[in-house]
Image (tube, helix red, strand yellow):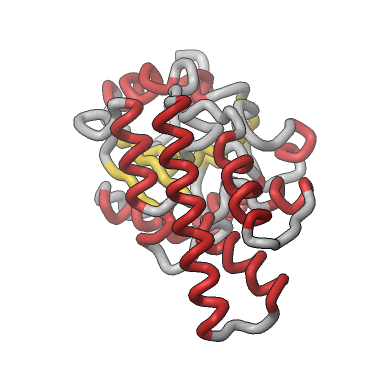
Amino acid sequence: MTNIQLVVFDIGGTTMVDNGQVPRAFEEVVRRHGIAMTPDEIVQWRGASKREAVGYFVRRHYGADDAQNAARMTQIYGDFKDHLRHTFGGEGVQAIAGAAETFAWLHARAIKCALTSGFDRDIVQLILEALHWDTGVLDATVSGDEVRQGRPAPYMIFRAMEQCAVLTAQAVANVGDTVLDMESGRNAGVALNVAVLSGAHSRDKLAKSPQTHIANSVADLPLIIAPGA
């Protein structure tokens, strides 16, 4: 077995089924505010802080930062959160098959589990409650508004390490479904950087990312951490 003490998981597309609610909500709200975007741009921002994504599109459309742009960003991001909250409330959320079993397998081996997300804390909490993961399932959760910069920066991984008292990134596995997830893991210096095919990005796209392994889903993680066990 590898010397892993902590596994850091992304949420959407990695541990939560990605039915496209998030990119649809994001695109609809941003376009409603008169800002255009291409499908490729939406894909490129998968896994990133949604607040940072709003800022990018607002600055691209209106120009340099100013007080008016700050107000636009606040309004658009607030509308996006309201839209997503309504969507999740109506459609519900669903865990990736095998996610809870993988958490249990890890805990049985004294390996801690953390979730990270580009969502702000209130959306993360809504998801955790809907999945019944808000108590007793995870050792740490980190949201995009709790760090200085979202992915590909490594800060959410570092914050999860701090919360779980893990001292070295060489004792950490990072799991995600996007190129930004993998870039974040590389920037953190994790031992295992596992790309899963259950979410936003294709095998071809993930194969070009700085992953150490590609798996069908989080259900396959035990085979990577303890091959042959």
Horizontal and vertical percent position of residue 66: 56, 85
Q: Extreme left residue here? A: 136
Identity of the residue drawn at 45% across and 22% down: 94
For the N terminus, the quadrant is: top left
Horizontal and vertical percent position of residue 18: 56, 30
- Work out whether residue 226 can be spotted: no
Horizontal and vertical percent position of residue 132: 28, 26
Note whether 129 is above or below 60 in the view shown. Answer: above
Nearest the viewer among 120 and 171 is 120
Note whether 18 is above or below 169 in the view shown. Answer: above
- Work out whether residue 80 can be spotted: yes
Horizontal and vertical percent position of residue 82: 43, 48
Identity of the residue drawn at 51% across and 84% down: 67
Note whether 13 is above or below 42 in the view shown. Answer: above
Nearest the viewer among 226 and 151 is 151
Residue 8 image-quadrant placement: top left
For the C terminus, the quadrant is: top left
Residue 98 image-quadrant placement: top left
Is 84 placed left or right of 126 in the picture?
right
Nearest the viewer among 127 and 70 is 70
Note whether 81 is above or below 130 in the view shown. Answer: below
Identity of the residue drawn at 33% across and 45% down: 141
Residue 36 image-quadrant placement: bottom right
How many marks the image carries: the answer is: 0
Identity of the residue drawn at 40% across and 38% down: 7
